[in-house]
Image: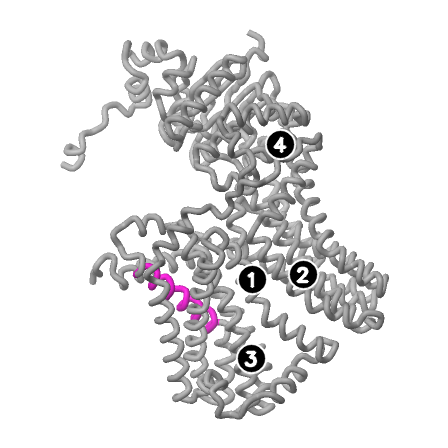
């Protein structure tokens, strides 16, 4: 059945087709035969997740669930965590809807309605968010159904309500930014906000618990006590979403009705001006600037020039700024812990060392991708009269120095309290950074810096290895801070993985 | 003629992807010559230029740049060459002055010379107003002029240009052409691919025609006319005859 071109269903079908092709391309990288491997890996992953979920859910069910304030509080807390992540994702997607020029110029220059396009793209964002959250929570819901019964299927409509509301919120925040900051700055601020929002709730909880207990080891009980002391009774409207999640039909109807109303009202406000805002976003270049000081021409080596270019581009990269802010935000709780334990930190410093190692490795991975893969002028660098080895060395040095600058204040603070742990941290960060750089070096691709946000999906193996190695180095550093003899053993998996990557990929990279 | 009288000397060059892209190519371009390389899409022009610029290793054959064999001294050869592609190789978040300083550093241009040349080039290409703005907001023509300034700042002896006029407006194209003519008058060698045959006809001293990775004809326009047996014809007619594309079919005939 053919649809009337330009109508909502027609645009929806068009969007669905594009999304589906993007997804299959992302998963199979253009090789349909890989689909079988992807399905097998996905099944294995989901099996593993179900196993983990069975343990977690089993403990939770054993502790007793029911239509009581404690269960509602736990569900509401989990819902807020998901909502923060969904909001972060939605803000990024909404910003892209305004600023991505992929087909916007084509569609907005056609007689088709920009309003219809916006409604369809908003719907796509909401549906994508719903599906992602549903996939993430499905092992837990399935185990709850096994343990307690089908009433837990009600979690899915509750998740749908969260997705609708967070999508609406993302649109409203973007609109507010357009009004307050103007189209020129909206994109950068929204990107930073999205990163911060994604991490804010977890970090906020950690900080609150640290201030009240002086440690992060008892977050669960501490948080539970704090919430239960101020929680309203079970019939309060505060628990409506949680009651919806446990199968209360009335609460579910209210939750979905409110969520749908909020999204429709937001669309009514935002859709009419979409075309104008998108055109305004197109009209300004968010990276145009006219007030830079002329650079000084100094005699410098090729390596110095390369390093200087990399640092200049790194500090001017909005994606990197937002990602780094998020990394720094994650470092905030350990920093506060350090401050609170000043002079008496024997027990908490290993945790701080582990977290800093983890953050440094993740940041190093990002920076290494930007310098090694995200080179906007590959051909220019390759035609320059310098050896490839020297070029790579200069770029890697740029990453190492940048990590050193970020981590140095933390090392200095810890050195003041415990020089041995500071030394352990320096070794841990150095090896974790080196591992991240080696992985990026071995999996380097030819890409544009603007593709930074999608680097995880572009090379899934590199991302997984990088995450695994970061976690292993973080754990090894923490353990080495407690007992220097244990650390090296804990680091063995990371060393083996990096060695294996080097062994397997070096020929491909050299070619 | 001695070998170093040639800015570019290619012997028996081979490159194969799925099928041969460059097939036993011999090509010589004299110092100070403006040489245009023409050919239909997929003929192998860009592959040849990328091998000369050191961006692609040949499967077989020799390439000498100003007497320097690229196999034995690739860095030395690169120091003589500038490469300008149809996609300007610039950084969104560097200003033209920062970009030129960066390139000057890579090619070992002394700082004071680099500074003077950078301002001269920006003035010459009418980019002084934008000297301290990020390149990210520039039009295609401005980006191509920044890339050209980058190619010229280290005073190369051989400039390789792959479709440098693609997407430029008439004013920018005129400026780029004037700059290239000026460089040739200073003794710089230029090898350029273009689909704008009028540019090749007006600017090039010699023209090489490539098809299926082979050099099928070479010479001045008059020599090409003789080779194609079409005296007095335009380069377009000569070119289409040489590459066997002849007269385009009429739409109605195709439809029928």
- Label 4, label 2: how far apart the Cα atoms are: 34 Å
Residue A35 lies, in percent from the top left, at: 44, 60
Local SS, label 3: helix
Which tag, 2 or 3, sits closer to the chain's start? 3
Q: Are marks 2 and 1 on the same chain?
A: yes
Which tag, 1 or 3, sits closer to the chain's start? 3
Q: Quadrant of the N terminus of chain A?
A: bottom left
The residue sitting at 68% across, 64% down in the picture is A331
- Label 2, label 1: how far apart the Cα atoms are: 15 Å
Of tags 2 and 3, which is closer to the observer? 3
Question: Taken as a whole, is the magenta stretch helix, strand or loop?
Answer: helix
Residue under pointer 2: A359
Local SS, label 1: helix
**Observer able to see residue A32:** no
Disc number for residue B101:
4
Q: Are marks 1 and 3 in contact (CB under 8 Å)?
A: no
Residue under pointer 3: A77
Span shown in magenta = A116-135
- Label 1, label 3: how far apart the Cα atoms are: 20 Å
Residue under pointer 1: A195
The residue sitting at 48% across, 29% down in the picture is B145
Specify whether B168 is left or right of A185: left
Local SS, label 2: helix
């Amino acid at each position: 059945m053919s649809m009337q071109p330009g109508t909502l269903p027609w645009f929806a079908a068009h969007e669905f087709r594009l999304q589906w092709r993007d997804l299959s391309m992302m998963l199979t990288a253009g090789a349909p035969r890989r689909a079988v491997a992807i399905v097998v890996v996905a099944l294995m992953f989901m099996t593993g997740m179900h196993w983990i979920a069975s343990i977690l859910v089993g403990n939770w069910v054993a502790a007793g669930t029911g239509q009581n304030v404690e269960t509602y509080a736990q569900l509401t807390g989990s819902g807020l965590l998901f909502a923060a992540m969904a909001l972060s994702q939605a803000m990024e997607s909404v910003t892209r809807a305004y600023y991505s020029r992929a087909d916007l110029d084509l569609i907005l220059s056609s007689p088709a309605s920009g309003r219809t396009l916006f409604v369809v793209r908003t719907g796509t964002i909401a549906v994508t968010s719903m599906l992602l959250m549903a996939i993430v929570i499905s092992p837990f819901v399935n185990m709850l159904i096994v343990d307690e019964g089908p009433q837990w299927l009600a979690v899915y409509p509750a998740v749908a309500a969260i997705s609708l509301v967070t999508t609406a919120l993302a649109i409203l925040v973007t609109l507010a930014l357009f009004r307050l900051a103007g189209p020129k700055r909206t994109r950068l601020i929204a990107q930073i906000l999205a990163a911060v929002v994604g991490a804010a709730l977890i970090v906020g909880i950690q900080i609150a618990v640290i201030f009240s207990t002086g440690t992060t080891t008892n977050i669960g009980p501490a948080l539970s006590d704090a919430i239960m002391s101020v929680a309203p009774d079970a019939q309060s409207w505060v628990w409506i979403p949680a009651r919806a999640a446990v199968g209360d039909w009335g609460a579910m109807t209210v939750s979905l009705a409110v969520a749908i109303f909020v999204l429709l009202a937001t669309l009514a406000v935002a859709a009419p001006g979409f075309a104008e805002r998108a055109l305004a976003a197109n009209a300004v270049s968010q990276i145009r600037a006219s007030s830079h000081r002329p650079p000084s021409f100094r005699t410098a080596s090729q390596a110095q020039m390369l390093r200087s270019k990399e640092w200049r581009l790194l500090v001017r990269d909005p994606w990197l700024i937002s990602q780094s802010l998020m990394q720094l935000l994650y470092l905030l709780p350990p920093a506060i812990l350090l401050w609170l334990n000043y002079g008496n930190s024997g027990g908490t410093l290993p945790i701080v060392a582990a977290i800093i190692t983890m953050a440094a490795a993740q940041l190093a991975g990002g920076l290494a991708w930007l310098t090694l893969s995200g080179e906007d002028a590959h051909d220019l660098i390759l035609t320059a009269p310098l050896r490839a080895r020297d070029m790579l060395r200069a770029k890697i040095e740029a990453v190492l120095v940048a990590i050193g600058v970020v981590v140095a204040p933390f090392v200095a603070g810890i050195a003041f309290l415990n020089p041995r742990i500071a030394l352990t941290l320096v070794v841990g960060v150095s090896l974790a950074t080196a591992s991240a750089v080696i992985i990026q070096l071995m999996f380097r691709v030819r890409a544009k810096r603007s593709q930074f946000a999608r680097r995880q999906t572009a090379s899934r193996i590199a991302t997984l290895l990088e995450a695994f190695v970061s976690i292993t180095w973080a754990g090894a550093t923490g353990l080495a801070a407690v007992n220097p003899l244990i650390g090296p053993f804990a680091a063995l998996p990371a060393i083996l993985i990096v060695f294996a990557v080097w062994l397997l990929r070096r020929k491909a990279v050299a070619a | 003629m001695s070998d170093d009288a040639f800015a570019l000397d290619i012997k028996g060059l081979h490159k194969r992807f799925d099928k041969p892209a460059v097939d036993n190519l011999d090509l010589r371009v004299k110092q100070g010559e403006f040489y245009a390389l023409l050919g239909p899409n997929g003929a192998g022009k860009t592959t040849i230029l990328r091998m000369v610029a050191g961006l692609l290793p040949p499967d077989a054959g020799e390439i000498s740049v100003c007497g320097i064999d690229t196999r034995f001294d690739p860095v030395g050869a690169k120091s003589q060459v500038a490469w300008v592609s149809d996609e300007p190789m610039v950084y969104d978040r560097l200003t033209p002055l920062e970009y030129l300083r960066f390139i000057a550093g890579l090619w070992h241009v002394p700082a004071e010379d680099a500074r003077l040349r950078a301002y001269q080039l920006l003035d010459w290409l009418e980019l002084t107003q934008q000297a301290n703005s990020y390149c990210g907001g520039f039009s295609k023509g401005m980006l191509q002029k920044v890339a050209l300034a980058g190619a010229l700042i280290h005073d190369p002896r051989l400039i390789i240009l792959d479709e440098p006029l693609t997407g430029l407006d008439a004013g920018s194209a005129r400026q780029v052409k004037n700059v290239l003519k000026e460089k040739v008058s200073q003794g710089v060698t230029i090898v350029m691919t273009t689909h704008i045959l009028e540019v090749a006809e007006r600017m090039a001293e010699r023209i090489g025609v490539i098809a299926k990775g082979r050099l099928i004809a070479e010479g001045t326009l008059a020599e090409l006319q003789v080779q194609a047996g079409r005296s007095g014809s335009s380069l377009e007619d000569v070119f289409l005859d040489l590459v066997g594309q002849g007269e385009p079919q009429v739409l109605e005939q195709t439809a029928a």
